[in-house]
Each structure stands twice: as C-alpha cells, then as structure tokens.
Amino acid sequence: MDYVSGIWSGFQVVLQPGNFLYCFLGCFIGTLVGVLPGIGPVGAMSILLPTTFGMSPVSAIVMLAGIYYGAMYGGSTTSILVNIPGEAASVVTCLDGYQMAKQGRAGPALGVAAIGSFIGGTFSIVALMLLVFPLAKVALAFGPPEYFCIVFLGMTLIIYLAQGSVLKAIAMILFGMILSTVGVDMVAGAQRFTYGSDTLQDGIGMVPLAMGLFGIAEVLTNIEERTRQDRVLLTTKITHLWPTVTDWKRSLGAIGRGSVLGFFLGILPGGGALIASFLSYAVEKKVSKHPEEFGKGAIEGVAGPETANNAGAGGAFVPLMAMGIPSNVIMAVLLGALMIHGVVPGPTFITTHREIFWGTIASMYIGNIMLLVLNLPLIGLWVQVLKVPYRILMPLILLFCLIGAYSLNNNAVEVLIMIIFGVVGYILRKYEYEEAPLVLAFILGPMLETNFRQSIIISSGHLSIFLTRPICGTAMVLSVLLLISSCFSYYRKAKDRLSQ
Amino acid sequence: MRARELPPILFFLSLGLYVSWASRGIGVGTLYQPGPGLMPYYLGIGLVLLAVGMILRMFLKRSQEEEKVEKRPKAIDYPRIALVVAALVVYSLVIEKVGYIVATLFLLVILFLCAGAKRTSAVIASVLTLLITYFGFTYLGVRFPPGILMVFGLY
C-alpha cells in the first residue's frame, strides 16, 4: 500500500472547504464538551448525529471524530483549573494538574497537557495508519467463527478491564445483550419482544439508548443536590504556557511512555482513553525518582495521562477500521454513523472506501494542529466558558438530547425510549453500575449472535468449530484465561475484605 | 455488597426470568440448531443465575457488613428530579400533537425554573433558546412537528 499517495489523497479530501469546516467544527465542539462538565463526547456525538444525515460520509465522520479527540484535549482544562474533570478520561489529571494551578503553575500544566495531547495524538495516527493495513489483510481471511471468537474475547476483556465490580459489569453486559435482541431477528425473521410496536421492530435505537444513559442520566445526577456547589475557578492569570527546560526534561519520558501505552490500550475492547490515562499515571508514579511529589503537583502526572488519553483515542480506531468491531462506546457511535451513511466498516473498508479512510486519517493530523491552536492561544475563551452556570446548561443539554432523539426518524417514541433509559441509567448510577459495558454489549450482541448462528450452520451443528480453527482456539483460550484471572482477582479481593 | 443494593438485583432477576420465559414462545431450538429465542433464553438464564449469586453473596456477608457504620447519604432533591422527568415524559407524549414550538416553550420554562432561574429570566431564556434552536436546527435540515400551529394556519 502506498501510504504517501493515500495520505496525500486524504489531505486533498479534508482540505476541501466543506470538510475543513466540519473538521474545525468537530474539534471546537469536542473542546467545548470536554471543557463543560455534564456532557461528554458520547452525548455530544449522539446529539449531533442526526445533523450529519445531510452531509457526505467523509464530512460526517471527520466531524464526529473531531468531537472525540477534541474532548480529550478539552477535558484537561477543567481538571486543571476547576478540579472537575470535563470528561472521564481527564479524572486523573485533577490530581496533579489542580495542585499545579494552586501553586500558580496553571500555565505550564495546561501547556504540557496540550503539547502532550498533540504528540500522543500524532503518534497514534501514524501507528494507526501503519497497523490498520496488515490487520485488515489478516481479517480478510476471517469467517463467522473467527468473528464470534474475537467478539467473545472482546466481551471478556470488558469484564476484565471493568472499573468497579466484576459482577456488576457482567450484569450490565447481559442486560445490554438482552436489549440488543429486541426487534426482528436477522437470521429467521422472527419478532422478538416487539409487542406490536413499529418502532421496536427495528430494535432499540443505539442513539436514544446512548443519549439516555449518558446525556439524560448525567443531567439528572447533576441536579439531584439541593444546594449544588458552584465551581471554584482559579482567578490567577494564566501565563507561561510553554513549559520550562526543567518541565520538559521531566515530561518528555512521560509523554513517550504515555503515547505507546495509550495507543495499545486504546485498541483493546473496553480499554480506550480512560484506562490509558489511569495506567499511565500509575506507570509514571512507579518510574519516577520523586514518587512523593505525585498528588502535590508533579508535571509528569499531567503529561503522561493527558498524552495517553489522546493516544488511546487514536488506537480505538484500529479495530473499527480494520475489522468493523468497535472497541468502546464512542467507536460504537461512529460505527452507527457510518452504517447510517451506508458504509459498513470491515476488512474491505480501507480499500473500498479509500476516501473516507484517508480523509479521516488526514483530518486527524489537521485536527491535532487545530486543537493545539484552540487550546493554547485561546485558553482564555475556554476559561470564560467555564463560568457558564449549570442552571443555563441543564435545560440546553436536555433540549439538545430531545431534538437529537426526535430528529433521528421524526418519531416521538424514540424520545420516550431515551427518557426511559435516562431514568434507568440514573438509577443504575446510584447503585454504582457502569453504563459503558451495557452499551458495548448492546452493539456487540447482534454481531456475537449472528456469527454464532452462522458458524453453527457452517459446521452442521458442531461446537468444535470454535476450538479447531487457530484464531478461534487462541481467542477462546485467552478468553478462558482472562475469565479465570478475573474470578481469581475477585476471590482474592473478597478474601482480603473478609480478613479485614 | 450491601442490603441497599437489592433493588437492582431484583430487577435483573425479574428481567432474566421474564426474558427466558418469553423466549420459549419465540422458539429456542437447540444449541446445535439455534432458533431466534436461543440467545435471549440463555442470556435470561445467565442473568437469573447472576442475580441469585449476588443475593446469596449479599446475605452471607450481611452479618459482617452490619457492624460497619454506613456513610450517611447526601440529601437528594427527588421532587426536582421527578418534576424534570415528568416534564420530559409529557413532552414526548404531546410534541407531535401540540407541535415543537408550543411544547418546547413550556418545557423550557419548567426546566429553567427547575434549574433555579427566576420567573422572568426563565421566560426570556426559554423564548431565546426556542428561537435559536428552531431556526438553527431547521437550517440543518431537522423537521419539527407543526402541531396545533397548523390548525391555526400559522405553519
């Protein structure tokens, strides 16, 4: 594959005025939702999905991808200045970023976060470009049994990498898969749990589900306190955004490690930017000569995680573009967007839809530069945005969710479905159940079922097909090992708790 | 796991029981000749087993947990949440009959008031938001339901 001609054609696509504008819009909206606590990239992408119907597939994906990696950039601003993460992947940045800001070093913290994000983002784009082609070539030989086993391995990884309780993660996966069975069965054409509803015949929509669980539930969580604490914004002037030589010396290693770690963790199903940032922080603390400074304003504690979450954002595109398998919820929304535009990602995607693939890659290069400009010289603008009170934001977020759900198919039933899932999501949050495994299982469930049934037809009813093929066997053995490891870790934690 | 965690577990238990029971009507088939109900059937059973396991674990650990002092939960403004949810549900039920403009205006006023805005500010903010979103999204190609405005010939 000629990478040079490919990337050149990608730049030609993205530098067309329309696509360039959508790339900027995506980065701008992404930074905005990253800065504003209360609405994350999933919510923003879901809300804006219907507005992409009139666009070309390239413009739509360029804009939606821009929202994703833009949010990773913007999330650090609130973590550093307000001690509230704008989105989940920036939680760990609060630990040292806010301490740096309190010490009058908000400028270098914001600067190193933006530069690290740029380097991590750029590294992941190059790695993505190089990795997608060989992976897609391998995936061309995959049949239904291989896809079944890989998706099964993905589900196991979601359990293994669950942030909280393993049992709760399994419950959410089963719940998500049950929800995915609603609608007309793709193999036999039978109706399942539709109760005579025309809307449910097409299944529960991914967008109302995601907007309910991530948008509505987030608002309900935010308004539940009678006396909500106002955000305390540091009023000191932000200067010296460019880090000093000492800051550079301390940050370069963290940025390098964060780039590699973030990219590879981003590829894993259920991994992505969130786990990448947490693990990067742990690694930096471990390798640091001054671990006691962590939590008190260590610049490595900002550089590593912020680089890792941006590199993770790029890594997440690999399984989607090479195999059509989304590795996280955001990629699931992107997959939905591609399918709405009649594009089915898979091993042939990069050859049959060259324009979209290379356009997206080139837009990421340009988007990273746009974000650097948006986040460093224009930091004052985002500080002003932070001052917008929640009493104004809350009705706007809810209204955008309602418009987003309605405009999908001009169907009020989908609005009701979104509200129901908003309430369900809010209640589940109260009991510390995570929404991400549910949504991922909802997306991967139909893939798992269809490929299982097709495999059984191919093998004339023999389950051994999932063990005798090399890729299947490897994936199944890995899945079993991961499950045993999860059970062992769960048992050990329970034993420790009991002994305490 | 504490006793207060019982409601979601009971929900999962009931859901699992219902799904596995209802799947039998769809046609489960066998593992070697799967029917459309096979996947939900086994998922339902899985959810039931998981819920039973969680309940057993909860009761086994209860005696130890009882000794611990539970953290006092923060004061939650449930009436406000209920009002917001009720407003959203009513909105979804009436939007096609009443139309976007009228339904959204009322909804926004309620939401701004719930969010703590004063009455006059709530009305002004609602009208402004309504106009901006209406023209903005119409420009982007979104078609809103006209509702009662069509009856009066205003649409």
Image (spheres, rainbow, N blue to C red):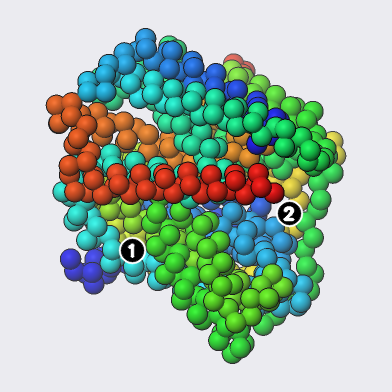
Q: Is residue B64 left or right of residue A266?
A: right
Residue positioned 59% across, 27% down in the render: B56
The local crowd at label 2, few if under 14, some if 14 to 19, many if 20 or more residues have their Cα within 10 Å, is: few
Residue A288 horizontal/vertical position (percent): 58, 78
Q: Secondary structure at mark 1?
A: helix
**Of pointers 2 and 1, the one earlier in the residue sequence:** 1
Q: Is residue A500 visible?
A: yes
Which quadrant of the figure has residue A300?
A: bottom right
Residue positioned 37% across, 48% down in the render: A481
Residue positioned 80% across, 53% down in the render: A230
Query: Which chain does the numbered disc 2 sit on?
Result: A
Q: Amino acid at mark 1?
A: Leu
Residue A437 horizontal/vertical position (percent): 49, 41
Q: Is residue A95 left or right of residue A391?
A: left
Q: Amino acid at mark 2?
A: Val
Which quadrant of the figure has residue B87?
A: top right
Q: Is residue A62 visible?
A: no
Q: Are marks 2 and 1 in contact (CB under 8 Å)?
A: no
Residue A128 bears which disc, if any?
Answer: 1
Give the camera-side residue of A48 and A301: A301
Give the camera-side residue of A78 and A328: A328
Residue B42 horizontal/vertical position (percent): 38, 24
Indicate whether A412 appears above or below A427.
Answer: above
Residue positioned 58% across, 48% down in the render: A493
The residue at the far front in this view is A499
Where is mark 2, residue-wise?
Answer: A388
Image quadrant containing the N terminus of chain A: bottom left
The residue at the far top in this view is B25
Residue B15 horizontal/vertical position (percent): 52, 20
